[in-house]
Image: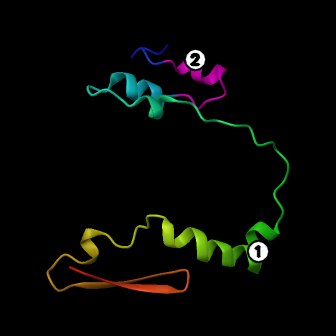
Amino acid sequence: MDDQGNGVRENVLLGRCPGTSWDDYAAADTHPVPAFLREDHYKYLGSRPIAASRYTGAEFFQLELDKMWPNVWQFAARDEDMPDPGDVVVYKNAGRSYLLAR
């Protein structure tokens, strides 16, 4: 335990990063944390190298364009990029562009 009562040593022994863990934050929360958020879903997937085509192949890239990018949150602009009503920003990603207006 560190001087704030966090299980830092235990995290290191379990192969986790040192410092305050998710469990430490959840335990200190003033609201009950749902049980499913407290479950550990870690699964060791091995340490074999990943094929370079995963990063360079056109086929895998197309799968990312089709399946991943339309379904993940993306940071498109900061407040200071369009501070006034009527300001616009064009956000481009993965072959698509979006017009953001304030």
Residue 62 percent across, percent down from the top left: 67, 79
Residues shaded magenta? 7-18
What residue sits 46% from the left and 26% below the top? 23
Tell me the residue that label 2 is attached to. 9
Quadrant of the rendered image containing residue 44: top right
Q: Exactly how many numbered labels are in the figure?
A: 2
Q: Is residue 26 left or right of residue 83?
A: right
Q: Position of residue 70 (x, y in %)?
A: 50, 73
Q: Tell me the amino acid under the disc marked 2.
A: Arg
Element at label 1 = helix
For residue 75, what is the image quadrant?
bottom left
Q: What element does badge 2 sit on? A: helix
Residue 53 % position (x, y): 81, 70
Q: Is residue 3 visible?
A: yes
* Amino acid type of the residue tagged 1 in the rendering: Thr
Q: Nearer the viewer, residue 91 or 61?
A: 61
| Foreground pick, 69 / 87 | 69
Residue 42 in the figure: left or right of residue 90 = right
Q: Which mark is residue 56?
A: 1
Residue ID at (81%, 42%): 46
Q: Nearer the viewer, mark 2 or mark 1?
A: 1
At horizontal 57% and vertical 17% (from top left) the residue drawn is 9
Residue 68: image quadrant is: bottom right
Instruction: Give the left or right position of residue 48, taking residue 82 as reference.
Output: right
